[in-house]
Amino acid sequence: MCVTAVESRPAGVLENASTSRRPFKARVMAFIALTKPRIIELLLITTVPVMFLAEQGVPDLWLVLVTCLGGYLSAGGANALNMWYDRDIDALMERTSQRPLVTGMVSPTECLVFGITLAIGSTLLFGFAVNWLSAWLALGALLFYSVVYTMILKRRTSQNIVWGGIAGCMPVLIGWSSVTNSLSYAPVILFLVMFFWTPPHYWPLSMKVKDDYARAGVPMLPVLASNKVVARQIVLYSWVMVGASLLLTPLGYTGWFYTLVALLAGGFWLWEAHALQNRAKAEVTGAKLKEMRLFHWSITYVSLLFVAVAVDPFLR
């Protein structure tokens, strides 16, 4: 099923306001908001621990700093370009109605220039201060998110978040390549963990705000399918994700500590996923569905798993 987003949108509160009427501090905060800092925090959580794993100890701290800065700028550029393209549907959804382009705090042209500048600057920073493999991986993630996901998949298919999530998996490859200037099975396995983590992480949130997506014409899976169907997909992806997370140890990359954390955190994830499925099967709706329990746990899960990735080399 193909759904086309509404092309027109109501004018933002400050859409036609002159620059002189927009306070400097508010403008600075608006440009920071374009980068979606809270999302980038999660990306960095999956980058730095992989650097420890690649180094099998403490990596060069200057390298960590530059990699984090480059990652922030690259992801920030992708997020700004995402907001530039999605400004029409952002105005239609309650949870995005206060974004800088909707309110007019930042103009579309400013946002576009800002996003492109961050894209170019981050690629050059990675290339000259880290290595060019990391630079191309970061640029690939940026282009995949801003073009393939935002412009092609998001408004056309319910599989948008499945394949669009590839961009969010790239930091693990970048973290490894920044240390080794190469790739290996370990970052590929963690890439797969994040790939299968993304749908069951995002679909519970989509279940919560599916009316928003429906209003904007975005075909997220919960808009097109029943809660039972979505919950079944969540359980399926969750099992594959947990299974993938356990591959690092038999291949010799991690030891007992990571394995223990992966088993305990993954086990609790599966408990929550099946609990959500049971409530969906019982046709529970509204607040009693408790879909956000899994969403919030998903963030805790990935944080615990990657902290274990960083700590494990010191306990082997």
Image: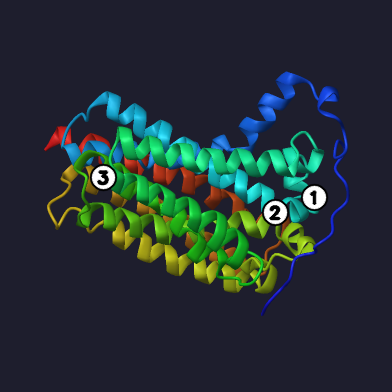
Q: Which residue is more in the foreground, 254 or 261?
A: 254
Q: Is residue 27 above or below residue 257?
A: above
Q: Which mark is residue 173?
A: none
Where residue 189 appears, as percent x and y from the top left, is 27, 57
Mark 1–mark 2 distance (CA, rounded to whole Å): 9 Å
Picture quarter with the C terminus: top left
The answer to which quarter of the image holds residue 213 is bottom right
The answer to which quarter of the image holds residue 203 is bottom right
Picture quarter with the N terminus: bottom right
Q: Is residue 137 left or right of residue 33?
A: left
Looking at the image, tell me whether mark 3 or mark 2 is earlier in sequence order: 2
Three-letter residue code for mark 3: Trp
The answer to which quarter of the image holds residue 283 is bottom right
Callout 1 touching callout 2 (CB < 8 Å): no
Three-letter residue code for mark 2: Asp
Residue, disc 1? 91
Where residue 148 appears, as percent x and y from the top left, is 53, 63
Q: Which residue is more in the foreground, 254 or 90?
A: 90
Residue, disc 2? 86
Q: Which residue is more in the foreground, 307 or 187?
A: 187
Q: Secondary structure at mark 1?
A: loop
Residue, disc 3? 176
